[in-house]
């Protein structure tokens, strides 16, 4: 911003037209936007990636990680419900991987 603040307004106007005044104000730390509170995120997510030697290949390991992710998501949903007085309306579970011959596989379910 320091370099932009040093450029004279006529030069900025020749390059950026009507936007030049706004750019120069921002370069000098002047922003007329009203400060608003952050909006709540519309979704919560929970995920983990397993690559290479860590790829999930046994049902017991898949079950373990699904339980862990489910517990984490349940805790986050409970906290969000307490703080923001709202409840989840949809749950989506997605998984991707590859077949034994390397073809990509993907599945997703919502409800």
Image (cartoon, helix red, strand yellow):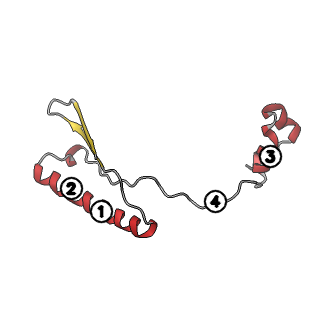
Place residue 77 in its image quadrant: bottom left
Q: Label 1, label 2: how many angstroms apart (C-alpha)?
A: 14 Å
Place residue 12 in its image quadrant: top right
Tell whether label 2 touches label 4 (CB within 8 Å).
no
For mark 1, does the 10 Å Cα neighbourhood hold few (<14), some (14 to 19), or many (20 or more) residues?
Answer: few
Pick whichever, 102 or 79, lies toward us.
Answer: 79
Nearer-N-terminus badge (3/1)? 3
For label 3, the residue is 24
For label 1, the residue is 74
- Looking at the rendered structure, the secondary structure element under dot 1 is helix
Nearer-N-terminus badge (4/1)? 4
Q: Is residue 98 left or right of residue 20?
A: left
Q: Label 3, label 4: how many angstroms apart (C-alpha)?
A: 23 Å
Tell whether label 1 touches label 3 (CB within 8 Å).
no
Tell whether label 2 touches label 1 (CB within 8 Å).
no
Nearer-N-terminus badge (4/2)? 4
Q: Is residue 11 left or right of residue 57?
A: right
Nearer-N-terminus badge (2/3)? 3
User: Picture coordinates of residue 6 (x, y %)?
Assistant: 82, 46
Residue drawn at (79%, 53%) of the image: 28
- Looking at the rendered structure, the secondary structure element under dot 3 is helix
Residue drawn at (14%, 45%) of the image: 57
Pick whichever, 36 or 13, lies toward us.
Answer: 36
Nearer-N-terminus badge (1/2)? 2
Q: Label 2, label 3: how many angstroms apart (C-alpha)?
A: 52 Å
Q: Label 4, label 2: how many angstroms apart (C-alpha)?
A: 39 Å
Q: Nearer the viewer, mark 1 or mark 2?
A: 1
Q: Nearer the viewer, mark 4 or mark 2?
A: 4
């Amino acid at each position: 911003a320091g370099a932009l603040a040093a450029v004279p307004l006529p030069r900025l106007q020749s390059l950026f037209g009507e936007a030049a005044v706004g750019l120069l104000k921002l370069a000098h730390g002047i922003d007329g936007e009203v400060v608003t509170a952050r909006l709540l995120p519309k979704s919560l997510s929970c995920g983990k990636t397993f690559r290479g030697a860590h790829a999930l290949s046994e049902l017991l390991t898949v079950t373990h990680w699904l339980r862990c992710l489910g517990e984490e998501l349940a805790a986050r949903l409970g906290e969000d419900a307490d703080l923001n007085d709202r409840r989840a309306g949809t749950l989506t579970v997605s998984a991707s991987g590859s077949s034994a011959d390397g073809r990509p596989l993907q599945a997703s379910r919502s409800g």
